[in-house]
Amino acid sequence: MGKHLNTCRKSRGAAGSIVAGVAEVPAKAVVKVQTFYVKVQDRDDPRYWMHLDVPKSLRLRDLDTYLREIWLECCGHLSAFSISGVRYEVGDVPSFDPFGPRPRNMHVKLYKVLRPGRTFSYEYDFGSTTTLALRVVSGGESELRFGIHLLARNDPPELVCHSCGSEPASVICADCISYEGYELVRGYLCIDCGGRHGCDQWMLLPVVNSPRTGMCGYVG
C-alpha cells in the first residue's frame, strides 16, 4: 500500500488530488496545501497501520487529537511524541524524570520538527501504554478539503475465539488477557462463548480495529 500511494502521489503531480473518503468535493472547498505523507503503525503489532496526508502547517497537538479520535481515546490519558531525542507532551506537563530534560508542549508546527525520512514515536496512556511508530515517507502538495486525511488503513485482523477455537472473536475479556511476548494468547471470545464466560460481563470489551483493543476502557 505504501509503494502504491507514493507512486500514485508522484504520478498525479499535485500529490494527490487524493481526498480520502470524499467522492466529489466542490472546487471552492478544496485548497492546495503543503503536506507530509505519514505512515503510522503500532510498534508491537504491525497488523495495525494507517497512511495519512497531514498538512505541514498543523501542530503536533492536531496530530495527537487525530490519533486519539481514530484509534486511541478512552479515558483522557496523557500522551507524548518523541522526535529526534526531544519529548513533546500534551499540555504543559512536567517530566516524570526530575533529572531529565523538561519536555516541550505539542503546540509546535509540524514543519519545524518533521522532514521526509524522519522516524518518530508516539505514546498514549503512560500506564497501559499504546506506542505507535511513525515515519514521514515524503512531502509534497495535496488537494485537501480540511485537516488530516486518511489515505488507507489496515483491514480488521481475523481474530479467532480463544475458547472454541473456530468462531470469529467479537469481544475481549479485559480480566483474562494473557500475552506471550506481545502476542495475545488468551482473552478473545465469540458471541456465544462470551455469553457463557465466567467473568463479570462488565469486563467484556468489543473487538475493534485498533491497537487499543482490550486495553483500559477502549470501545472504539
Image (tube, helix red, strand yellow):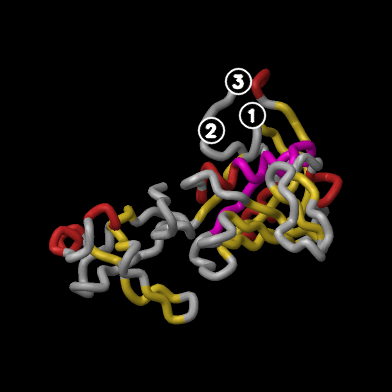
Magenta stretch, residue numbers: 49-65
Residue 151 can be seen, yes or no: no
The Cα–Cα distance between marks 2 and 1, rounded to whole angstroms, is 9 Å
The Cα–Cα distance between marks 2 and 3, rounded to whole angstroms, is 10 Å
User: Could you tell whether 70 is left or right of 62 in the image?
Assistant: left
Q: Which residue is mark 2?
A: 22
- Residue 91 spot, x, y in % from top left: 70, 42
Q: Which residue is mark 1?
A: 145
In depth, the one of 219 and 200 nearer the eye is: 200
Image mark for residue 12: none
Q: Amino acid at mark 3?
A: Pro
User: Could you tell whether 21 is left or right of 147 in the image?
Assistant: left
Residue 139 can be seen, yes or no: yes
Disc on the earlier residue, 1 or 3 = 3
Label 1, residues with CA under 10 Å away: few <14, some 14-19, many ≥20: some
- Residue 116 spot, x, y in % from top left: 80, 56
Image mark for residue 26: 3
